[in-house]
């Protein structure tokens, strides 16, 4: 007895080898019919014995390819002419869109093996890929995800590639970026020392320059890396000088060796199981790991810090470079500081001319930038510091449905944007600081691309309440309704949304800056309630910041604020401090702040660690690096209730300890961390006594401090609290766009 069914499968089912898998499964079960891509979903028609059809439906989810996340949305019986075989039908772009744009995938083990097989026709080919690996997000023009809809459309398949692409049982069946040395992209090398070269010669020139201590700009999947020998101190220092990046840590790409690929990781760092798992994860992020004293790497890679940002190669070109070079390479973003990573060869040669000695280009077009994702293990889970290649577009779901598509444009620093419709949210890859024309151009491009790729045109824009953020100005320039969301409300809502909390919670939103409800600079707040209805219940004693925004890059200003507030002189007084004091006394450009991030800056300054920061959070990072295994036990700061009824912590006791305690610098740093952890716990207990709240969220850049956050979690668990720390969306300002969506979605809901 034969019957016919039509199945509709949604989820992550395009760009992951799902149709070839369905073909093989149907053939194995001797079923006839067809499978095709639609606008984001996969449609399947099957005919055969009912028992085999039931097995088919079960196995299509249970045995799906590793990168697929299928959901059997609907099954319906129908009458259909009997078919003689199973085949893959042409894609159809019409119908209701349920688009899932796949991120870029790392080179799989099978492709790596072929690339290293001298007998394989893709031996040493830098663009080898299959249905389970290779670029996706960075090459897609439109959906459905078919080759003509990608930047590979200009490369015409040779007969051999075409035979693989069209053979249902081949592992490259409908691998859209399929290519080989005959018909696919190639690499080219250019420098002032040699004429342009291609292929193996180009690769050899690049390796020779790296061995000679030079810097090479290498075009990858989502943009350029600046590479140099990670063990060569002079090479690293030269890169820093040329890029005007004196202190910010540089990422290091390590050769993949050993059974699990992590032998070199263990030689240079002390990596736990969580770090090792993250390094090997298909997302292939940069992972912060504690450096070994005898790592053999240049000390100037992460000056003053105890951790290294490490990652394993994720593209075939990376593997070829590391195989030939034979050691770790610095691989930092090829960009002007704060901007999105550069993607075009002409732009790279022009804008990085004073940084790179040579350029290893390729001619596969990159449609949009995707910088590397960065993770840090905090409280035994990987927490994203930046989402990019391999992770984003990051898809999340809401617990409520939106009546129309909305766009959230995030903050100003570490910008991401988010598009939401129905109960779906898509967060973009990292864009960066919105201070330059290129950043704003990419910002606008990503907004346009997301709406076009997902087929969801925003009818409403959500922005930060700060009137002068570039993202907020862009929102006001659009002819759409606008809803502003306060910065820290967005931080709190991001926690609520990620964990799908169903009741009122208390979220501590500690960071360096954010426009508050009263017009002051917040950053030490405890917000109680739920999205759309947050109430400020805790804070810190306010202080006035001399120079306003300058304090973020000049920690001495935060130290000055605390000293001057308490009638003390500034210990480390730089040039300009006298003028700053005069302006502060006259309340000129000295906005009120409650930001914990600025308090950590002040501590770093007062301990002599950092007076002028060359990158964001340099002072707090140096402060945390001092701790090592120090005991963080300390007393909480005194609490008081201000005129508005807000429970506040008084930082003056911490200032006294930093200035007068007979402790060494490391002990002071430990005491400072311990004070703030204990203070958070004391604040939470007081709020619980008033409200009964037992669920606590931690969000904001301060909670990227591993030692502080882990200490807080231990203390809170001991007091019977449930602690929520984001693990999908960054806790820094990269999560603001998602939080804006959540806050907006819940407004008006009781």
Image: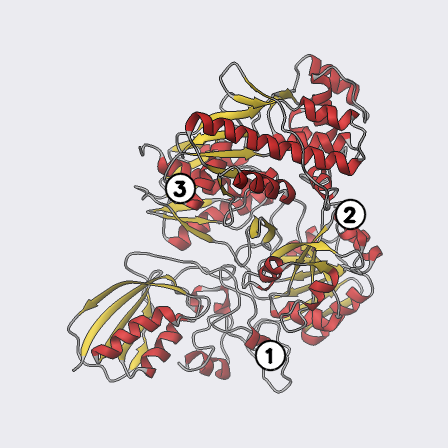
Q: In this view, does 748 lie to the left or right of 415?
A: left
| Up/down of 648 relative to 715, above or below | above
Residue on which disc 1 sits:
113
Residue 459 lies, in percent from the top left, at: 35, 40
Residue 359 lies, in percent from the top left, at: 71, 62
Q: How is the image coloured?
A: secondary structure
Using the image as rendered, state which of residue 72 and residue 453 is in the foreground. Answer: 72
Q: What element carries label 2?
A: loop
Q: How far is the residue under mark 1 from the one under mark 2?
A: 37 Å
Residue 477 shows in the view: no
Q: In which quarter of the image is the C terminus?
A: top left
Residue on which disc 2 sits:
303
Crowding at dot 3, Cα within 10 Å, few <14 / some 14-19 / many 20+, comes out as: some
Q: How far is the residue under mark 3 from the one under mark 1?
A: 46 Å
| Up/down of 659 relative to 379, above or below | above
| Up/down of 468 relative to 717, above or below | above
Front position among marks 2 and 3: 3
| Up/down of 686 relative to 139, above or below | above
Q: In percent of the image, x 48 and y 83: which residue is there?
A: 159
Q: Which mark is residue 501?
A: 3
- Give the number of callouts: 3
Crowding at dot 2, Cα within 10 Å, few <14 / some 14-19 / many 20+, comes out as: some
């Amino acid at each position: 007895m034969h019957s016919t069914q039509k199945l509709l499968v949604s989820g992550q089912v395009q760009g992951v080898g799902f149709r070839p898998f369905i073909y093989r499964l149907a053939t194995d079960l001797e079923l006839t019919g067809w499978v095709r891509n639609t606008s984001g979903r996969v449609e399947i028609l099957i005919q055969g014995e009912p028992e085999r059809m039931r097995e088919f439906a079960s196995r299509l989810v249970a045995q799906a390819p590793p990168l697929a996340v299928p959901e059997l949305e609907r099954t319906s019986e129908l009458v259909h002419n009997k078919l003689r075989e199973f085949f893959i039908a042409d894609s159809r772009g019409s119908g209701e869109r349920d688009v899932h744009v796949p991120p870029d995938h790392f080179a799989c083990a099978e492709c790596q093996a072929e690339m290293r097989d001298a007998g394989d026709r893709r031996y040493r080919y830098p663009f080898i890929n299959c249905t389970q690996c290779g670029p996706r997000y960075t090459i897609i023009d439109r959906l459905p995800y078919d080759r003509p809809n990608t930047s590979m459309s200009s490369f015409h398949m040779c007969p051999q590639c075409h035979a693989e692409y069209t053979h249902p049982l081949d592992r490259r069946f409908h691998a859209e970026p399929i290519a080989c040395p005959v018909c696919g992209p190639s690499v080219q090398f250019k420098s002032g020392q040699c004429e342009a070269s291609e292929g193996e010669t180009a690769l050899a020139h690049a390796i020779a320059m790296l061995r000679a201590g030079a810097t090479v700009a290498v075009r990858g999947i989502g943009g350029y890396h600046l590479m140099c020998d990670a063990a060569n101190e002079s090479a690293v220092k030269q890169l820093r000088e040329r890029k005007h990046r004196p202190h910010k840590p540089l990422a290091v790409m390590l050769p993949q060796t050993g059974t699990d690929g992590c032998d070199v990781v263990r030689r240079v760092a002390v990596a736990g199981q969580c770090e090792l798992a993250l390094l090997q994860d298909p997302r292939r992020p940069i992972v912060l790991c504690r450096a070994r004293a005898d790592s053999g790497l240049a000390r100037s890679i992460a000056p003053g810090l105890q951790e290294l940002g490490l990652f394993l190669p994720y593209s075939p070109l990376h593997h070829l470079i590391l195989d030939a070079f034979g050691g770790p390479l610095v691989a930092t973003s090829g960009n002007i500081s704060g901007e999105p990573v550069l993607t075009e060869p002409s732009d790279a040669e022009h804008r990085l001319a004073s940084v790179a000695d040579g350029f290893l280009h390729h001619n596969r077009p990159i449609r949009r930038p995707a910088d590397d994702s960065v993770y840090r293990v905090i409280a035994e889970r990987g927490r994203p510091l930046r989402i990019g290649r391999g992770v984003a577009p990051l898809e999340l779901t809401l617990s409520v449905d939106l009546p129309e598509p909305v766009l959230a444009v995030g903050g100003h620093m570490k910008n991401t944007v988010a598009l939401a419709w129905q109960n779906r949210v898509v967060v973009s890859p990292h864009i960066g600081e919105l201070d330059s024309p290129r950043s704003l151009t990419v910002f606008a491009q990503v907004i346009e691309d997301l709406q076009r790729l997902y087929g969801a045109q925003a009818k409403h824009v959500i922005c930060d309440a700060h009137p002068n953020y570039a993202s907020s100005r862009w929102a006001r320039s659009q002819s759409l309704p606008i809803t502003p969301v306060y910065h820290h409300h967005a931080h709190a809502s991001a926690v609520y949304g990620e964990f799908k909390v169903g009741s009122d919670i208390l979220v501590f939103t500690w960071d360096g800056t954010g426009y508050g409800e009263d017009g002051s600079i917040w950053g030490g707040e405890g917000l109680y309630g739920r999205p759309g209805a947050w109430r400020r219940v805790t804070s810190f004693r306010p202080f006035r910041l001399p120079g306003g925004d300058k304090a973020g890059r000049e920690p001495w200003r935060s130290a000055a604020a605390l000293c001057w507030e308490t009638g003390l002189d500034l210990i480390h007084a730089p040039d300009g401090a006298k003028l700053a004091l005069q302006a502060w006394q006259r309340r000129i450009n000295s906005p009120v702040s409650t930001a914990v991030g600025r308090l950590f800056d002040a501590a770093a300054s007062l301990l002599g660690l950092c007076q002028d920061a060359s990158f964001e959070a340099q002072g707090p990072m140096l402060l945390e690096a001092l701790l090592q295994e120090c005991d963080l036990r300390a007393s909480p700061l005194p609490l008081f209730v201000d005129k508005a009824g807000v429970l506040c912590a008084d930082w003056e006791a911490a200032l006294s300890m930093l200035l007068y305690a007979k402790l060494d610098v490391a002990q002071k740093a430990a005491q400072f961390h311990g004070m703030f952890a204990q203070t958070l716990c004391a604040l939470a207990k007081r709020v619980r006594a008033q409200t009964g709240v037992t669920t606590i969220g931690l969000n904001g850049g301060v909670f990227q401090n591993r030692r502080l956050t882990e200490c807080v979690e231990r203390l809170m668990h001991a007091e019977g609290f449930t602690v929520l720390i984001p693990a999908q969306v960054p806790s820094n300002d990269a999560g603001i766009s998602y939080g804006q969506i959540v806050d907006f979605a819940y407004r008006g809901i009781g």
